[in-house]
């Protein structure tokens, strides 16, 4: 496979090959994202059902495994309803703006030693930057709906994202300091000996907490708090536009689990099984953990949540950062004879 | 004592009357207004500046209907007042008619009534437990609460065939005798329940997020509560040991040994604790009633057409799961009441929302409305 640099400087065949690879990669990513989101929706329903002494979907296919497909078909047939006083172009754009970043983030997710769409040198930064764009879409949805509940949901989202983006980034910086790299593949490769969860336990906990808030899941599902705001920013959405929000939500859920796997749980490293299986197993375990939270915990209040972000998580992540830097500095000082 | 200020709409409701504030309409179709309660909120961002409960969306005119129906027919309407505790509603009405007309109730029927009323109290509190979890964003308690309630409903179905509107307790006794196997199943339920209550506390009551959501929210002092006419678990949560089963005994409640749980501050956490302890006490009452259950008739001497004495009136009150449930009947000697008035506990309890929620957040309002345990069927009647 030619790299983009040689392709752009070289002959037309390699240029074609590069574009071909990009198209293949995007098809693979879209395919995986959609299938994974559908699987997660079905799985969440099953997990929640069994936690609540129910069975969950049982009718469509074996133990209801076709349920998500049936639901997708139903959503496709739904009438396209736009509130009379909505801001139409923005209302149409919002689901797309939420969905596209969710799927773009998969460019840099390392599923295996060679199974990555593009191992950018700033991979981690890219993922975090691109997933932040989704806030704009959520705010657009809340604003364009012209509904007070939606607006409240959108305002809450912004407050929440601002509070939790910071500890999320800071908690990952510890890993970056350890590996001296932002490339996802390098980070995974450097965990061949020891997983970073052992070196960064605090960072992992902060990341999981902040990430739960980042994808708006219980106990931090404040922007869509059903019992307070009906459905928050997507109250007015139905049919396929709603499906876009829904798929984006589950895509993001897998994204944060994949980041946690790549940065803390050794990525695709593991004995016997092929690397990609290990990566998926670890990621789906993190997803299961988040589902477990959701079906066990009540919801925190907005001020408590923002207080937790600013007063607990950010100081803790700074502490984690300082400790990591000090240790790395001391170790380097021992080997290289001081840092200039 | 909190000053009770109640600005009736439309005062303070004009758009733009308050800088930076907006009105939001919560209900009658909203996930956490428990049916069709409508709350008009004046909000400043997330903070509540004014609350006006608007009721009447479930008004079915039960009190007026009673004036054109024979006494025995109103039992079916009383089912539909507080539909989560139909047994207690039946019981209150039956006792009012019995006292008005001087009917005797056989011993066995009295015991069955107590068993049913207390089972229904537990079922009602279980629904509250589940929906309160739902209000606070936890889904699983709802399924857990309904799982145990189902067993109570099955018991009721055994006894009278109905699962929601029982019409089981009628003036003079009960409609049917307990079927074979009822006592054994009820005892099995009593044995199973304490472990489940511990499970509920593990899942919700002891959860740190839950506690931080409800502790210190909407404290209510006894004086304000009494002034507002608040009764039931809400009043007991303020620290006043007031329960009609003990303080104005009806039926045969004076024979049983049970505690009346109270709280201290009257906040949402106290309301939770009081209700959960009440379930335990109700279990004790049922156990004693099952032990003492005598043989004998289940229906006293009641004429086919009940006629109350001329120019008689009665106000009879019983302790429903939500508080003081009163039936006021004025008779002019005809087979129908001349006037029937229901004192619904949820209606008075609802009045405590506005004074306690000003200055709190919309999420707290959900916690407060949920902790009151309103049933709109009873509020609107």
Image (cartoon, helix red, strand yellow):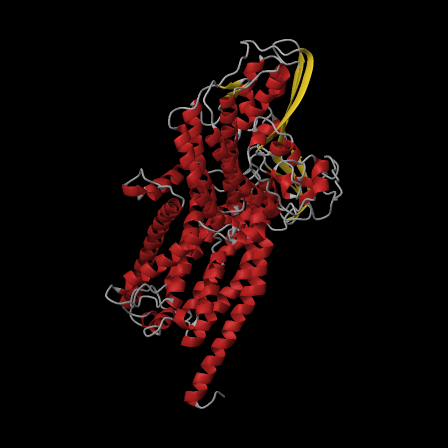
Identified at 53% across, 13% down, the residue is: B301
Q: Quadrant of residue B52?
A: top right
Q: Position of residue A43 (x, y in %)?
A: 35, 48
Q: Is residue B61 visible?
A: no
A224 relative to A116 in the view: left or right: right
Say above or below: B129 vs A201: above
Image label count:
0
Residue at the far left in the pictured view: A272
Horizontal relation, residue B25 to residue A107: left or right: right
In the rendered structure, the answer to whether residue A33 lies left or right of residue B202 reads: left
Q: Is residue B103 above or below residue B158?
A: above
Q: Nearer the viewer, residue A117 or B34?
A: B34
Q: Residue at x 67, y 22 (%)?
A: B315
Q: Position of residue A87 (x, y in %)?
A: 56, 44
Q: Quadrant of residue B77?
A: top right
Measuring from the top left, give residue B237's x and y in whole percent.
63, 43
**Which x, y percent locates residue A49?**
38, 44
Quick one: quadrant of the N terminus of chain B?
top right
State the image quarter where residue B229 is shown. top right
Quadrant in the picture for the C terminus of chain B: top right
């Amino acid at each position: 496979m030619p790299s983009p640099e040689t392709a752009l400087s070289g002959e037309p065949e390699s240029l074609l090959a590069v574009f071909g690879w990009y198209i293949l990669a995007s098809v693979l990513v879209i395919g995986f994202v959609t299938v994974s989101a559908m699987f997660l929706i079905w799985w969440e329903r099953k997990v929640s059902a069994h936690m609540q002494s129910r069975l969950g979907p049982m009718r469509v296919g074996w133990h209801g495994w076709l349920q998500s497909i049936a639901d997708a078909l139903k959503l496709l047939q739904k009438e396209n309803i736009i509130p009379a006083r909505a801001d139409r172009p923005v209302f149409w754009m919002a689901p797309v703006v939420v969905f596209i970043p969710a799927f773009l983030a998969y460019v840099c997710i390392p599923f295996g030693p060679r199974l990555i769409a593009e191992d950018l040198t700033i991979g981690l930064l890219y993922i975090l930057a691109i997933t932040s764009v989704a806030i704009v879409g959520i705010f657009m949805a809340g604003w364009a709906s012209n509904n007070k509940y939606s607006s409240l949901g959108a305002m809450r989202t912004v407050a929440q994202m601002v509070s939790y983006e910071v500890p999320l980034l800071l908690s990952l910086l510890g890993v970056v300091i350890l590996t001296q790299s932002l490339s996802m593949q390098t980070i995974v490769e450097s965990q061949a000996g020891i997983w970073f969860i052992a070196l960064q336990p605090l960072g992992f906990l902060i990341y999981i907490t902040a990430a739960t808030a980042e994808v708006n899941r219980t106990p931090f599902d404040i922007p869509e708090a059903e019992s307070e705001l009906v459905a928050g920013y997507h109250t007015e959405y139905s049919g396929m536009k709603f499906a876009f929000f829904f798929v984006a939500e589950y895509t993001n859920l897998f994204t944060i689990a994949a980041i946690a796997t790549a940065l803390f749980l050794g990525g695709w490293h593991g004995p016997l099984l092929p690397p990609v299986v290990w990566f998926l197993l670890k990621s789906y375990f993190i997803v299961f953990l988040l589902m477990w939270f959701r079906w066990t915990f009540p919801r925190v209040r907005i001020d408590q949540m923002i207080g937790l972000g600013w007063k607990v998580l950010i100081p803790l992540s700074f502490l984690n950062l300082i400790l990591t830097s000090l240790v790395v500095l001391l170790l380097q000082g021992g080997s290289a004879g001081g840092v200039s | 004592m909190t000053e009770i200020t109640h600005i009736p709409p439309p005062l303070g409701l004009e758009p733009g009357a308050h800088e930076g504030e907006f009105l939001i309409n919560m209900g009658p179709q909203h996930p956490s207004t428990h049916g069709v309660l409508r709350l008009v909120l004046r909000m400043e961002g997330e903070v509540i500046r004014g609350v006006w409960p608007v009721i009447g969306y479930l008004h079915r005119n039960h009190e007026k209907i009673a004036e054109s129906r024979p006494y025995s027919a109103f039992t079916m309407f009383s089912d539909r007042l507080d539909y989560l505790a139909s047994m207690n509603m039946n019981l209150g009405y039956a006792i009012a008619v019995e006292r008005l007309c001087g009917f005797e109730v056989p011993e066995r029927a009295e015991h069955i009534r107590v068993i049913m009323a207390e089972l229904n109290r537990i079922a009602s509190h279980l629904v509250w437990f589940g929906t309160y979890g739902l209000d606070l964003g936890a889904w699983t308690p709802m399924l857990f609460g309904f799982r145990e309630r189902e067993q109570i409903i099955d018991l009721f179905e055994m006894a009278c065939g109905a699962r929601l509107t029982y019409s089981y307790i009628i003036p003079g006794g009960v409609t049917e005798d307990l079927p074979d196997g009822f006592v054994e199943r009820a005892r099995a339920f009593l044995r199973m329940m304490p472990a489940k209550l511990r499970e509920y506390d593990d899942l919700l009551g002891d959860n740190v997020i839950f506690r931080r959501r409800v502790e210190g929210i909407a404290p209510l002092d006894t004086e304000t509560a009494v002034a507002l006419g608040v009764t039931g678990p809400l009043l007991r949560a303020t620290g006043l040991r007031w329960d009609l089963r003990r303080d104005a005994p009806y039926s045969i409640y004076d024979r049983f040994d049970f505690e009346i749980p109270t709280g201290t501050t009257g906040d949402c956490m106290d309301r939770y604790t009081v209700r959960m302890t009440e379930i335990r006490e109700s279990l004790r009452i049922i156990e004693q009633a099952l032990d003492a259950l005598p043989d004998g008739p289940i229906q006293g001497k009641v004429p086919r057409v009940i006629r109350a004495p001329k120019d008689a009136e009665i106000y009879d009150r019983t302790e429903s799961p939500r508080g003081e449930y009163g039936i006021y009947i004025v008779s002019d000697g005809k087979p129908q009441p001349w006037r029937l008035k229901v004192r619904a506990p949820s209606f008075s309890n609802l009045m405590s929302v506005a004074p306690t929620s000003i200055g709190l957040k919309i999420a707290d309002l959900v916690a407060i409305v949920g902790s009151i345990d309103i049933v709109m069927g009873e509020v609107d009647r």
